[in-house]
Image (cartoon, grey):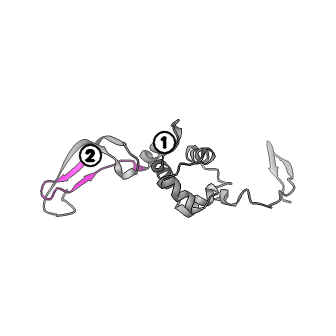
Amino acid sequence: MKCRECRAAELKITRENHRYDESGLPNVVLVGVDVRRCTNCGFQHVVVPHIEDLHRGLAQLVAKQAAKLTNAEIRFLRKYLGYDRPMFAKVMGVDEGTVSHWETGRPMGAIADRLLRVLVMRETPIEEYPNDALADVAQEGAKMPPLRMRPDGAGWAADAA
């Protein structure tokens, strides 16, 4: 395999531990990953296999820790969930400035901290109630319509009002 930077040399492949600063989290080390180095220009490429599984595992570890979430962890979890700041603010029920403060200095409150952890730890998304729908709940002045339920085979189903 040729170097993609200088195209002049073959890459030397070694197995190493790599500090994974690219995640945005401090102190994450990938153990025994392939590192490809150009013997000519020094270009280095770290091979991270199954990156989605890696990020899912990191997100689960961060969400399950006992300590309050740090600014870097909040940013990592937001990105893991796939939210930009405006959508994350809507889902969390805050303004964008609050999200910015959480990610740069001010700690998250306990309720927001727990909500973020629940969003991350949920094993499978609920198809009928996606995370984006959280932005539309708990509106001031909204009224709950009458609920109508009907027997449906082995259970119950909502009846269209």
Q: Choose top left, top right, bottom left or bottom right for residue 42.
A: bottom left
Quarter of the image with the N terminus in it: bottom left
Which residue is at the far front?
A: 106
In the rendered view, tell whether residue 136 sits above or below residue 151: below
Q: Indicate left or right for 2 with 111 as reference.
A: left
Q: How many C-alpha atoms fall within 10 Å of the one at disc 1: few (<14), some, or many (≥20)?
A: many
At which x and y percent is residue 4? 22, 62
Q: Residue at x 53, y 41 (%)?
A: 68
Q: Secondary structure at mark 1?
A: helix
Judge left or right: residue 131 versus residue 141: left
**Is residue 41 located in the magenta-colored stretch of the structure?**
yes
Amino acid bearing label 1: Val
Helix, strand or loop at label 2? It is strand
Q: Residues within 10 Å of mark 2 (few under 14, many from 20)?
A: some
Left or right of 42 on screen, residue 161: right
The residue that mark 2 highlights is: 34
Name the image quarter holding the C terminus.
Answer: bottom right
Magenta stretch? 33-51
